Amino acid sequence: MNTVELGTQATDRAVNANDADVPFIRVRNLTKVFLARKSKRMRLFPGRQAAKGFTAVNDVSFEVQRGQIFVIMGLSGSGKSTIIRMVNRLIDASDGAISVGGKDVCSLGPTELRAYRNQTINMVFQHFGLFPHKSLIDNVAFGLKVRGVDKGIREAKAAEALRLVGLGDRIHAMPDQLSGGMKQRVGLARALATDAEILLMDEPFSALDPLIRKEMQELLIKLQRNFKKTIIFVTHDLNEAMYLGDRIMVMKQGKDIQNGTALDLLEAPADPYIEEFVAEVDRSRVLTAGLIARHRHVGQPDGPVRPSDGAERVSEGTVLHELLPVFAAGAERIGVVDQQGESIGIVTAEDVFAALSPKGFSNAS
Amino acid sequence: MRLNIGDWFASMINWMLANFGGFFDAVSWLVNLLVGEVANVLIGLHPFLVIAVLAAAAAALTRSLGLTVFSVLAFLLIVSMGLWPEAMSTLAVVLVSVVFSLAIGIPMGIWAALNNTVSKIVRPVLDLMQAMPVFVYLIPAVFFFGVGMVPGIAATIVFAIPPAVRLTELGIRKLDLELLEAATAFGAKRSLILKDVQLPLAFPSIMAGVNQVIMLALSMVVVAGLVGAGGLGGVVVQGVAQLDTARGFEGGVAVVILAVYLDRVTSGAQSLGDVLRRRRTRKEQRAAAASDPAAAVS
C-alpha cells in the first residue's frame, strides 16, 4: 500500500530525470561574508565593514543536474557547510544567486520559504539532529506534521520510510536507544519521508565508525537507485566523495578550486592541494568498472559483450578492488553492464592496472 | 555630594500610592480573596483527607514509597503539634505566590530566550530583584497593600520570579543548535518549533525553576510573618517575640516539613519525563515482540 505510494514516486522521478540537460540547482557567484560582532558600530564606517568580516564563501558557482549526487569536498573552514545552508537559507547569502527549478531561492518570502523548505528540500545533519524527546516515528513524521498531514497518513509514511532504511521494527524506540549508524538511518528516513526532491547532506557519515560509514554509503547508493533524489553532499573525505559523487567540487578557503568527476580529479588535479589529496585516495576502492569501461569505450568501441563470450559480467558500480580476484582467477576480460543489464563495454586486466597507477589513464591512451 | 537615592525612591512610592491607590486596593482585595478561598478549602477539609491527597500526589509524582510514608508521618506530626491550620494557611500563601510567580516568570523567560534585547534588559533587573535584601521589599509592599497576607505575597513574588525566568531562558537557549536547524530546515514555523521542540526539551530546566520558585516562596514565609502574614511565619515570629523556644521550634519544624515535602515532590516531577519514556520503551518492546522479528529489513 505505502510501498506502492513511495515506489511510484521513483518512477515519476525517472521520467523527470530525462530532462536532465537543464540544471536543477544553479548557484551563481555565491558569497558569504560573516560580519564580526559589534557590526553596528562598523556601519558608521562602511569602508571597513568588508575588511572586518570573514569571507566564508567566496564567489562560488556550480550547477547540479536532477538526480545527481553533487559532492562538495573540503577541509573544515573551507565554507562547504555554509554553502548548503545557503541553499535552504538557514544562512542568508551575502551576494550571488541560487535558483532551484528556475525559482530564485534568495528572494522567497517567509511563507514561500517555509513551503520550499518543507516540500522541495531536506537536510541530513552531521550529528543527526534527531529530536531526543520524540520516538523514531515521530521524528520521521516531523516534516509531514509541519505540512499539516493527518496523523494516520503521516505515521504510515514515516513507518514506511523507516522500513526502507532497515528500522521497520523499531519505530517506537527513542533516539537515545540507538547507535550512531542507526540514528543516521533515522535522519535519512526523515529526509525521505517528505518526498522532497533535494537532499542536503552535511557530513552525514563523518561521525560514524569506518565500517558503519561504509555501510551507510552503500545504503545511500541503494536508496538513490530507487529515489533519484538530487543530492548535495558535503564531506571532508575524498574517498567518500569519489565513491558517492557524480560530480565533485573541491573547496579551499571559501573558493572552489576544482569541479569535475572523480576521474577528472584523479587525472588532472587542478592544483598541488588537490594533488596531495588525490595521492591519499585508494584508487582500487574508488574507481568503478563502469567508469573504466566507458573511458575505454571512447577510444576503441568493443561492441556488445555477448553472454556466449563466457566472460564474467559485473555491474557498473563495482569497484576495481572487487575485480582483482576475478582476474586472478584467470579471466582476461570482464563484461560491464548497467543497472538495466545493458552492456556498457569490457574491462581488461591491463585497463585495471593502468587505472590503478597514478596518471594511469593519460599514459595508457 | 550626597545623592538622596533613598528619598527619590520613597517619593516615587508616595507618588505611586497617591495616583494608583485604587489599583493597589483592588489587587489587595483580589489576592486576599484568592488566598482566603484556597486556605479555607485546605483548612475546611478534614486533615486526614488532605494528608491522603498530599501523600497520593507524592506517590504519583515520585513513585517513592519512602517519601510517601514520610509525608504521611510528617503531616500527622504537624497535626499533633496543633499547627495544622497555620501550616495550611502557609501552604495556601505559597501556592498562590508560586502560581503568580510562574505565570509571570515562565512567559518572561520564553520571551527573553527568543529575543536578545529583552534578555539584555531582563538580566540586570533580575539581579536587582534577587540581590536586594528581602526586607526592603516589605516596606513599600506594606504601604501599597496594608498589613497582612498580601504584602507578604507581593514580596514573595518579587523574590521568587528570577529563577523561573532564568531557568526557563537557560533551558530554551541551551538547546542544541543542530536541532533548531533541523526543525527550521523542515519548514516549521517559530511557534511550532517553540511548542514542539524548544519547550519540551526545556521542560527539565523549567521544572528545576518551578522547584526553585517554591523553595524561595517557602523561605519567604517567615519573613512575611513579620508583616502579619500569619501562618507558620506568624508562629515563628511570635515565638521569637515572646522568647518562647518551644513554640518557635515547633513552627520551624513545620516549615521544614513543608519544605522537604514540596522540594522532593517537585524535583520528582522533573524526572516524570523519564518515567513516561521508560513506559514508552516498554510499550515498544511489547510491540516489537508481538510483530514478526523477521519483518526487519536489513
Image (spheres, helix red, strand yellow):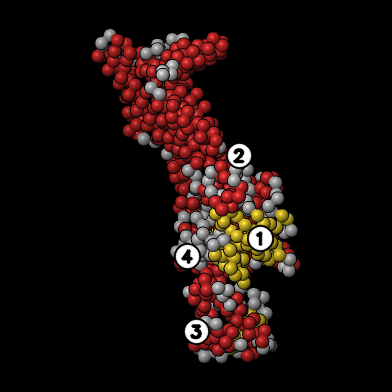
Given the image, on which type of amino acid does mark 4 rest?
Ile
For numbered disc 2, what is the local secondary structure? helix
Q: Which residue is mark 1?
A: A29
The residue drawn where x is 26% and y is 11% is: B244
Given the image, on which type of amino acid does mark 1 rest?
Asn
Residue A63 sits in quarter: bottom right
Query: How far apart are the alpha carbons under marks 4 and 3?
Result: 24 Å
Query: How far apart are the alpha carbons under marks 2 and 3?
Result: 59 Å
Query: How far apart are the alpha carbons under marks 1 and 3?
Result: 47 Å
Of residues A286 and A339, the one drawn nearer to the viewer in this rendering: A286
For label 4, the crowd category at 10 Å Cα-Cα, with few meaning under 14, some 14 to 19 and many 20 or more, is some
Q: What is the chain letter for disc 4? A: A
The residue drawn where x is 64% and y is 81% is: A294
Residue A181 image offset from top left, x and y in percent: 48, 60
For label 2, the crowd category at 10 Å Cα-Cα, with few meaning under 14, some 14 to 19 and many 20 or more, is few
Q: Which residue is mark 2?
A: B191
Residue A85 image offset from top left, x and y in percent: 59, 55
* Same-chain status of marks 4 and 1: yes
Is there CB contact under 8 Å for labels 2 and 4?
A: no
Residue A359 sits in quarter: bottom right
On the question of residue B33 being in view, the answer is no
